[in-house]
Amino acid sequence: MEEERTHEAHTIFSCACSCGQKCSFLLLPACPSKFSCLDNQMWHVGNLGKSGLRVSCLGLGTWVTFGSQISDEMAENLMAIAYENGVNLFDTAEVYASGRAEITLGNIIKKKGWRRSSFVITTKIYWGGQAETERGLSRKHIIEGLRGSLSRLQLDYVDIVFANRNDVNSPMEEIVRAMTFVINQGMAMYWGTSRWSAMEIMEAYSVARQFNLIPPVCEQAEYHYFQRDKVEVQLPELYHKIGVGAMTWSPLACGLITGKYSDGVPECSRAAMKGYQWLKERVNSEEGRRQLAKIKELHLLADRLGCTAAQLAIAWCLRSEGVSSVLLGVSTADQLLENLGALRILSQMTPQTITEIDALLGNKPHSKKELRA
Amino acid sequence: MEEERTHEAHTIFSCACSCGQKCSFLLLPACPSKFSCLDNQMWHVGNLGKSGLRVSCLGLGTWVTFGSQISDEMAENLMAIAYENGVNLFDTAEVYASGRAEITLGNIIKKKGWRRSSFVITTKIYWGGQAETERGLSRKHIIEGLRGSLSRLQLDYVDIVFANRNDVNSPMEEIVRAMTFVINQGMAMYWGTSRWSAMEIMEAYSVARQFNLIPPVCEQAEYHYFQRDKVEVQLPELYHKIGVGAMTWSPLACGLITGKYSDGVPECSRAAMKGYQWLKERVNSEEGRRQLAKIKELHLLADRLGCTAAQLAIAWCLRSEGVSSVLLGVSTADQLLENLGALRILSQMTPQTITEIDALLGNKPHSKKELRA
Amino acid sequence: MEEERTHEAHTIFSCACSCGQKCSFLLLPACPSKFSCLDNQMWHVGNLGKSGLRVSCLGLGTWVTFGSQISDEMAENLMAIAYENGVNLFDTAEVYASGRAEITLGNIIKKKGWRRSSFVITTKIYWGGQAETERGLSRKHIIEGLRGSLSRLQLDYVDIVFANRNDVNSPMEEIVRAMTFVINQGMAMYWGTSRWSAMEIMEAYSVARQFNLIPPVCEQAEYHYFQRDKVEVQLPELYHKIGVGAMTWSPLACGLITGKYSDGVPECSRAAMKGYQWLKERVNSEEGRRQLAKIKELHLLADRLGCTAAQLAIAWCLRSEGVSSVLLGVSTADQLLENLGALRILSQMTPQTITEIDALLGNKPHSKKELRA
Amino acid sequence: MEEERTHEAHTIFSCACSCGQKCSFLLLPACPSKFSCLDNQMWHVGNLGKSGLRVSCLGLGTWVTFGSQISDEMAENLMAIAYENGVNLFDTAEVYASGRAEITLGNIIKKKGWRRSSFVITTKIYWGGQAETERGLSRKHIIEGLRGSLSRLQLDYVDIVFANRNDVNSPMEEIVRAMTFVINQGMAMYWGTSRWSAMEIMEAYSVARQFNLIPPVCEQAEYHYFQRDKVEVQLPELYHKIGVGAMTWSPLACGLITGKYSDGVPECSRAAMKGYQWLKERVNSEEGRRQLAKIKELHLLADRLGCTAAQLAIAWCLRSEGVSSVLLGVSTADQLLENLGALRILSQMTPQTITEIDALLGNKPHSKKELRA
């Protein structure tokens, strides 16, 4: 066996934790408080849901960017920065850029020569091709789709395979059996869901228990200032009941939060891209305008806290009890470094700040009351 | 053995079905079209969810009224009118009028001497007394609470025992085991849930399957013009997946729909009663005022269809795919006869009328999309 | 404990078996060949299917007769003759004569004072009353219906409770759970099916195995010269796979076989009774006429064998591999004694005779071929 | 990774659906009505039973033709036409032409280079060789037989492996365990039954549930004008209860329906081939003659609808509720194109036309009555 090399994390920012030990800010192997800091309310690396898998609290997504919006060189640069700063989670999907996101990701991993055991790769299956049999969550497509992904990624296995959405035309038993099959074949370590309802996740769990199959460990969900209900109300309940963790995406609401669209949709932005007409419409809607007003206030708060609006938004996501990891979508190194800086202000996500943001947003969901009335 | 008496239904309204045969309008023993009328889209007596239990599509509730708002003579009068017109479902709860609703209901049943097998009694357990151990869904309270109900009802068993709300402090396994216990003891034929979320119901089902216990057959849910989501979107999915039926209550939104509050809250109405401050506030809120405007339009539609606003509202509830039975809450014989008359206009719940009402309400929930996009 | 009295069977006919021992012809406690005679091809008392329950190969039915066509005195007389000749099986149903068949049967049993352990009582549940909830196989009706039957029979339990037909509107899980419940409550020893398809019986077995419930032991099926398929092809397969036995009825095809209708429908016959118009039509149909021609030939064969046409028909039923017991429907003592005499000619049901009858009937069903081609 | 080629469907016939969009007539990726047309009563691609597998409603069979009756060039030609017109289902069996059908099919697939995920291959196991151990459904033969098929097909897996008939000498547990094994080994995606009785399929399901094995998804059954019972009565029940779909064969009753044999058996027809003596006898029997008379009437009806008798027969099969796919057996390109044209007239399978055909055939099976009588 070759010698196991120690991961030498490059510390850019100092750790916000008060444990007193020197450690890189994301991977904190020696932190006595189990990689969680500040009275366990924030953490840098932690377990994904109640599974044993350790993921960094920030992950790098490849949606829109890899194999499409950005060059392969930029993709490699972003991966390197992320990895060196302790990000161990990289997320993709068979449908991203028609498979090219996976190809780019796979090429970079191969080139870098990082130990396979030092990072976590996740992909998502649902839309794999034009043929009827290449879409959905049939056993055929889950298996063939994942084989295609592994081939493009040049990997023997992914760490988590997600069902990219639920397929009401495939029976839950077939889906859970197929996910269990790919895990038992060694093609994936775990499986998860993406954009499923709480009831559907519970149904998957029910079927897994009924037939002694493997239940999902994680739900990927959209989560930001303007989309809170599922992650703040439903997923914590699932976490407590069946251990499912939350990996969230779009912390900046497709850029809405950065203030990019405060004065309309610029030519070069995502909302102006082909296929993103819906985003443009959303920005220009009445609701969109109300949201932009709130974003301006959040910018003032960020100024006060000495961080950017994006950092505040990401740190705000991380403060949520059920969130295991937040996926970042960036197209430049500066954006990435800025986003990673969100960890610096985790310590400022105090109850007072949280309350202030909630008041400002005015959309705090009612959590399930536990009163016996 | 006492002689088996034939049920002599008193026919008030003629049957809306086109079978051509003379029959009472709720129980149609001779109807050749499987007791369903109008091309099987509407029905008078049907199965509760996918269970084998046959319930009339209108049931009589006892909330607020029995043992409290109305005299025992009036209660008896209402029961007699309902039973003679084919209503076979009578619903109560241990908490209604602190147990007096059950006592009144039990006394009437005993006095009338109706065959126990000819009707369905349901009660609900959660709030049974002042002591800590007399509330919630602990095994102790489910069993002790139901024993108390049976004693007050002077019955050996109820047909369905409902958990009146979920109890997040009792483990689901304990709840489902206790429900299975009371069924296996013969104290109830079935069990159901009341005001549980879809995920909680799925969890109960999951636990039942995992430990070979008995799953619930029915959810009691609020359903009327202004509360649609759960009954129209979530319960149909549960019905298709695990067979759970819907028994709905408040078809008139606590009287809001009858126009009673159109000019403010009258002294003698429910909204003026002690403990109903919330209803008064609701009526007087901005949202409440918007709803009252819509109700005025619905009155015009009812006029056009030749029925009352209450009849239209009840028939509208019955047209919903997942609804097995609608519970009526009435305090006078006239109200009851008027409500029962809703069956007369079931045949007018055509797609056109439904579309017109949806446009008027403007709150039709999106059903789950099945597109593979 | 009171002394166990020996059952003194009144031997009318000498036993056809070659075991050499003196024994009453139905109950043969000392027969060394396990109550089966003649190379195990015929038997007098045997196990019902693969269950442990021992039933006489001829049973007494109460359909049409008890509580209706015949007087209670005649019913008592028939029961006594049957019991004294070793018949230990008496079958009824909640629907027969609207419950009066059960009342008559119960009164006779009580009056006679026979030991409860010395005979087998079976009843059937499905049609129990006029109310919607008093019919079908809901849990409610199975339990309430059987309680009603036990009350009319003045018994604590029946030996087998049958589902009188399948109820496609009740889920199989509910039916099997309810049957298991009444057995666990001590209200029945076993449960069975009546007029169910092979697939439905297999489904009941499947559900019983899946949820660790009690599977059925027996199917009641119509069986005679002109109705052979189910009993000769499907039930033997079920017997071998899951142990379900066959208890058959109408060995004389409602009298058709006795020659009663050979010259038209006489005034006093069953086919002339109210509600039996279908039988009259059947007798007078083209198919009916073809069958009557065959019956004439079978009369000649009976003459040759020295028995009556009815005896031949009953013995022919008993020769079938899967048949555990044949239920007789008689209205006079002479008829009963004649029918019981069928046992005398069991020894003449040789392969040659069977072949001759098959040739004559021309409707021998193809048994499932086991060839590997 | 090789470049993902878009499926370029060659549109021969215009789509019968009213979606207004241009699309190939079988695979309708852009059809807004969920790939189903004509009010969801007919479809072009759909799920196989309740499984997630998407199959085209017409499939290409290889029985009699591949590796035997037709040249390999013709076979390739037929496959190409079928695939280009949206057929994604190709069926074979180890026994067809003693394995040569599979060899031919495999060679063509390899030569064409179609993406494996874009089509569905099914084969059937039962008769694999001369040795005793090479036939039937022993675990040994299921595994060895399928390995042989995969080797001849030059594939890693088939999509569905069928048990070509039931084997009463192999215990059901062994069969279901072996099928589960080959699926868990990745040698097949699903398993199905061919020519099994409804009870046998239910038994397989029961065993699968009892031992937590994988249940079958599909039954292959003969289905045409003169063979209706199983597909119209029994399979729909199985579909509703356990999700098993129907893939049917012989839509033209071995050519009987095309009128080929109306004037006797021509020298060159299938009925004149060696080993098809049974077909010749059937054509010449009294029953056969009655059927030919009806076929003449159906030709007149086809004329009236503007289609051929074969097209009418195939469209008639597709109109049946439980049928997921109809397998075509053709030996020329013209025949195939004609058969595929059946989709054009799906819209003419109106209730009136169906009623007319039923009257003409006079053999409409009674569906299970749901009356509570």
Image (spheres, coloured by chain):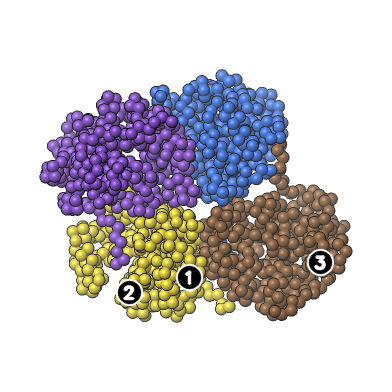
Chain colours: A purple, B yellow, C brown, D blue
- The quarter of the image holding the N terminus of chain A is top left
Circle 3 chain: C
- The quarter of the image holding the C terminus of chain A is bottom left
Residues marked 1 and 2 touching at CB (< 8 Å): no
Whether residue C351 is visible? yes
Q: Amino acid at mark 1?
A: Met
Q: In front here: D99 or A339?
A: A339
Check disc 1 and report its element: helix, strand or loop.
Answer: loop
Q: Position of residue A364 (x, y in %)?
A: 22, 53
Q: Which residue is mark 2?
A: B130
How far apart are labels 3 and 1 at the CA level? 47 Å
Q: Which mark is residue B187?
A: 1
Q: Residue B371, relative to residue C263: is it above or below?
A: above
How far apart are labels 1 and 2 at the CA level? 24 Å
The image quarter containing residue A128 is top left
Q: Which residue is mark 3?
A: C30
Q: Establish whether labels 3 and 1 are both on one chain.
A: no
Whether residue D233 is visible? no
Q: Position of residue C272 (x, y in %)?
A: 69, 66
How far apart are labels 2 and 3 at the CA level? 69 Å
Circle 2 chain: B
Q: Position of residue C314 (x, y in %)?
A: 77, 60
